[in-house]
Image (cartoon, coloured by chain):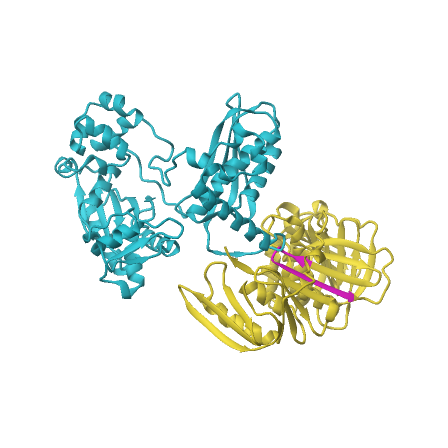
Chain colours: A yellow, B cyan
Amino acid sequence: MKVSVNKDDLTFATQTVTRILTSKTSGASAGIRLTAEDGTLTLMANDLEIAMACQISAEVITVGAIVIPGKLLGEAVRRFPGQEVDLFVQEGRQVLSLRSGFSELDLIGMAPTYFPELPDILDFSRLKVSQSLLKSMLRQVSFAISTDDMRPILTGMLCECRDNSLRMVAADGFRVASRKEDIGIECPDGFRVVVPGRAVNEMARLLTDNEGTAEVTVGRNYILVKINDTTIISKLLEGNYINVDQYLPTKFTTHVEVKPKALLDALERAAVVAKDGLAGTVRLYFSDGLLKIRAQSAEHGTHYEEWAVDMQGESLEILFNIRVLIDVLKSVETGDIKLSFTGTLGPCVGKNAAQEDKYWSLAMPVRLS
Amino acid sequence: MSPKERVILHSDMNNFYASVECLHRPEIRGKAVVVGGDEEARHGIVLAKNYIAKKAGIKTAETLWQARIKCPGLIVVPPNYPLYLRYAKYAREIYECYTDQIEPFGLDEAWLDVSGNDGVMVADEIRQRIKAELGVTVSIGVSYNKIFAKLGSNIKKPDATTLVSRENYQAIAWPLPVGDLLYVGPSTQKKLYWQGVSTIGELAAMPVDCLQRLLGKVGCVLHAFANGLDQSPVARLSQESLIKSIGNSTTTPRDLVCDDDVRILLFVLCESVCARMREQGVLSRTVAITVRDSELFSVDRQAKLKAPSCISGEIADAAMQLFRQHYTWHQPIRSLGVRCTDLVPAGGLQQISFFDDEVNRQRREALERTVDSIRNRFGHSSVQRAAVWADQPLGSINPKGDHVIHPVGYFKDGMKA
């Protein structure tokens, strides 16, 4: 193999694919495979749950492939002095020579023979979605993905495509977020799959706010997402996702409309002192068009503020974990948020005035047991 | 003391509850203060008192109205356990600077193994630090075993250090009344009194076999205690709550043969365990069951709860599920136990999950508290679950009332004679 590539391209590709390598992986799958062919160099990492491939343009003199320990390559490429990097593997030897400017580096690698192949995706449906839309959907939903292994299915995000709308849902027991969007094109069979949180986070990182599209392919056991020159393939989580709509209350006692930014800032101020117990609990009182916010800890002090809010219904006192509420508020992209409460111990539903029924989120309060 | 000799401190916070209350309520300092239970709930007794109240002749555990007669103008404050727990934790953090062998005994007492150091010097330093940093005082006994250290901390109060060494224990510990010794309660004291034993020295002089005949297994233990022969180690420090678990088990009047039998008994056990958790003001996050079959083979299984709980219905469901998962009915069952561990203090904050109907959970807890108070007034059998009623011999077991459980045991693995 003998290729020449741009250093920044190579750095980007290396950094992108090495992110999925964890300390868990070992052997060939702890490495990155470099494949040179048809004017491109493809870097790929694969830990059998998730695989990521990044293609960059290259001047290919001889085709070939090699596997290099992921960490080594990342550290090396970043520090090269020149703008171009020449990569060379001598036939029959498993050593990658990197040359850039006056610097030369030989890295010991492995034959690509044992590198895990990508799975075949069976019975797939494919759709193209605008990157900015997908990014916005993930931003509004992915925060609620659970990190607790008690209910493994909740460590993923539900992706559902029916008729011509795409819906994404995440829930962790304390929060739910749901976003639905018309994608304009008919998806003939539709699908309902659960994508692991890890893959969702990688996708969110790669998506940009620009005009481009992302290609999503959903098969029986895998999802493949192609964003620009990067491809993510992830195993899907097995099992039935919960029906979150059943937790969405229909009767409310109190409605409040606020600017998310104003409440967010207030909560961040409260978070300064509220560090005890459940990592920060804040007390909200809504009464007579007034919102009072109170937080305190024995160790750090107290916080209090009050301001007028647009409210309807009964007055209410409710406790929240500050982070839970902040996440919900942050997920509102534009306009005011309408918070609807069901009482001191019941869920609070957040809706975005601008997005109507396309988006809702739910946060559970904290109780004084 | 020889170099291999252990150096053990027993630190006792003086008038702990009352001192902490006075610290937090400047307006009651310098007055006679007692911490008292709720009179409405018929818990109106003196839980703790300060020195001024003590001077007026008020005793712990007497009724509040008696105390008020003895001391007009007496100030009674309700107990604030979370606050006391916090101070107990602060004190423990100071102890941790000196050793990791710290064994709490209740909220206000702890043994420390500081072997290799000059015990009196360490004790004086701890005393000064607790006074300066927490604003309360401790008395510390220094000795070569836990029992004499505990006696020592009781001799000079408040804010004092007492050394009980191999040289002076006969002069210091032996004249003390025998009732000061751990495990000598009123009935043991009475038995000893009839043998002419009223001081620890007299107990020490009794032949072991005599004591064993008189008191059984505990006789040997007391003989060792009185002679300074106790070898029990100071437990290692653990970060968990002071009470680690609450459990009940029972050997059944007849063997259990089916799931229904087990369900009845689990309800009975869980009701007892949960009532005790409510008494202690704790919630559990893990439930464990012990099943012993008629061949005396036993298994222990545990599972995490979805949310911290003291609701017997929830605990019983989790216990039953554990049982169904792990027991195959290869043998009938002879004894069954339920234990709640991973305890957290109630009154803390708890993130609610949308999987649980929290309003309903609170109602269930309130219901069980009501049942507790009915049972306190009218007896355990005054209210029963219908399921438990189905089998009288099994259902009428009252684990909570039938066993006296010491909140903290001195012997961690049971008593060894």
Is A232 on the left-hand or right-hand side of B354? right
Q: Is residue A276 above or below residue B237?
A: below
Q: Quadrant of residue B189?
A: top left
Looking at the image, which residue sits at the far bottom? A308
- Residue A154 sits above or below residue A135 on the image: above
Magenta stretch in the rendered image: A170-181
Residue B284 seen in this snapshot: no
Q: Quadrant of residue A145?
A: bottom right
Instruction: Give x and y (percent) for residue B56.
Output: 19, 53
Q: Nearer the viewer, residue B71 or A300?
A: B71
- Magenta highlight: main SS: strand
Above or below A283: residue B15: above
Screen quadrant of the N terminus of chain A:
bottom right
Identify the residue at horizontal 44%, vertical 66% (top origin): A296
- Which of the two residues, B312 or B385, is positioned nearer the viewer here? B385
Q: Is residue B346 left or right of residue B322?
A: left
Above-or-below relation of B281 to A82:
above
Question: Residue B415, position in %: x, y?
Answer: 34, 30
